[in-house]
Amino acid sequence: SQQGEEDPQALSIQEGENATMNCSYKTSINNLQWYRQNSGRGLVHLILIRSNEREKHSGRLRVTLDTSKKSSSLLITASRAADTASYFCATYSGYSTLTFGKGTMLLVSP
Amino acid sequence: DSGVTQTPKHLITATGQRVTLRCSPRSGDLSVYWYQQSLDQGLQFLIQYYNGEERAKGNILERFSAQQFPDLHSELNLSSLELGDSALYFCASSKRGTGGFEELFFGEGSRLTVL
């Protein structure tokens, strides 16, 4: 069963715009990760944020975590056509292993 | 290239049959994870092995089984296949097998079609 739920399910923007995706989860977590998947390919790790961190940056990516609201957001700045992919949040609560949401499909048009 | 190798890339078979999917983890990684991805269920965790031992179990059906061999490669066996088993099966690996405290490296997946 999914722990994280991404929102929106799909997002369409123009190159150069920013893209924001949100993830909500139900139970307490140790950390949260974001992954990217190009159509039909394997997932690629983007960033990991621990439960005691509020914000983290990596290149054009900015991730925030609000444990009181049980939510996280992924911001991609100055989007490029190559950013077109599905983005997944994955949570770890100390049990089992990483649990993925159903993802947000991002389409960046030139 | 993640360094995780999965074979076969595509597989088409009939209901009732049995298939084996193979995964070679990244060099140095001791843990292997299997995930199933379908349109309706999303990405579902099946099972995790660490250095040959089962470490965690998820939504794996009784018709499915897996193992990790001494050379650390892993196989996922799917038997008595049903139409609903059609999906992308991913293998991922990590160094320490700590589940969520480290990033996972995913293979390109094995696409199974059951007719």
Image (cartoon, coloured by chain):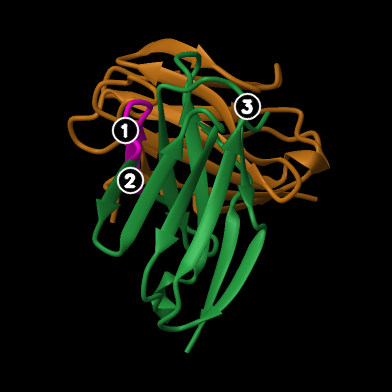
As for residue A30 lying within the magenta part, the answer is no
Q: Which label sits in the foreground, 2 or 3?
A: 3
The residue at 30%/64% (across/down) is: A60
Q: Which label sits in the foreground, 2 or 1?
A: 1
Q: Give the mark, 1 or 3, whose residue is nearer the N terminus.
A: 3
Instruction: Evaluate whether label 2 is on the same chain as label 1.
Output: yes
The residue at 31%/33% (across/down) is: A53
Q: Type of residue at label 3? A: Lys
Q: Element under label 3?
A: loop
Nearer to me, B110 or A63: A63
Query: Chain A appears in which tint?
Result: green
Question: Mark 1 belongs to which subunit?
Answer: A
Residue assigned mark 2:
A47
Residue assigned mark 1:
A53
Q: Would you place residue A100 above or below residue A68 in this image?
A: below
Q: Would residue B4 be seen by someone viewing this image from the given angle?
A: no
Question: Mark 3 belongs to which subunit?
Answer: A
Q: Type of residue at label 2? A: Ile
Instruction: Evaluate whether label 2 is on the same chain as label 3.
Output: yes
**Which numbered dot is residue A26?**
3
Give the residues drawn in magenta, as a range: A45-54
Sort mark 3 into few (<14), some (14-19) or many (20+) by Cα contacts within 10 Å: few
Whole-percent x, y for residue A10 in the image: 65, 64
Q: Element under label 2?
A: strand
Whole-percent x, y for residue A63 in the image: 38, 49
Chain identifier for the orange-coloured part of the image: B
